[in-house]
Amino acid sequence: MPISISGRRILAALALAQSLAGCSAAAPSRGEEPPNGAGAPGETFQDFLDALQVRRADVELAGTVAQPALGGEGARVIMNGEPLQVFEYASREEARGASAEISPDGALVGETAMGWTDPPHWFQHGRLLVLYLGGEKQALMLLQDILGHQIAGANSLP
């Protein structure tokens, strides 16, 4: 059944209210998707790799990484010499659920202290959860361009 004009207005108002609730001007709320701009990744790990390659990043697949606190295994990726851990979930809701377990400073996942040796930077977009351990400004800019603002971890870009 089609939605009437007044129904559309109500839905639009609800969508606007939801998007404004709890958002700060500095960054999107935890798990919020960045705007769909040109080259924005879709839902999959392959989409993320494609987005990196479109931006001419040097990408190397470096095996898998086990993170039981995140619910399993992810892919190790080297992007322009910088280490990433990429986790793909069956749904956006599962990815958001996993991201909700990460402390604001990125040091804890659930009850587990991760003991990172480099500053953690966590990003969540669609079904993906991406961890970058490091502080290279160009790497952070590239990840932010593709995935939006980080959801947890060390201070991000100004």
Image (cartoon, rainbow, N blue to C red):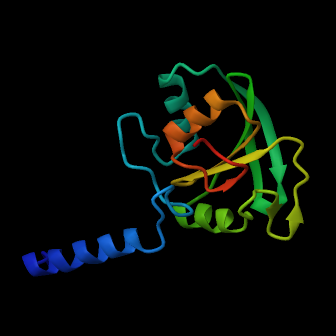
Q: Quadrant of the N terminus?
A: bottom left
The quarter of the displayed image where residue 70 is located: bottom right
Q: Is residue 18 left or right of residue 131?
A: left
Residue 111 picture location, percent across and down: 85, 70
**72 vs 154, nearest the viewer:** 154
Which residue is most to the front?
A: 158
Q: Is residue 114 above or below residue 120?
A: below
Q: Viewed as shown, does residue 66 lie left or right of 141?
A: right
- Above or below, comparing residue 8 to residue 35 in the picture: below
Q: Residue at x 35, y 35 (%)?
A: 38
Above or below residue 42? Residue 142 is above
Q: Residue furthest left?
A: 5
Measuring from the top left, give residue 56's x and y in whole percent: 53, 19
Position of residue 124 in the picture relative to residue 86 (left or right): left
Picture coordinates of residue 63, whole percent (x, y): 79, 34
Report the quarter where the C terminus lies: top right
- Expressed as whole percent of the image width and height from the top left, the position of residue 78 reads 72, 28
Residue shown at the point (16%, 76%) measured from the top left: 9
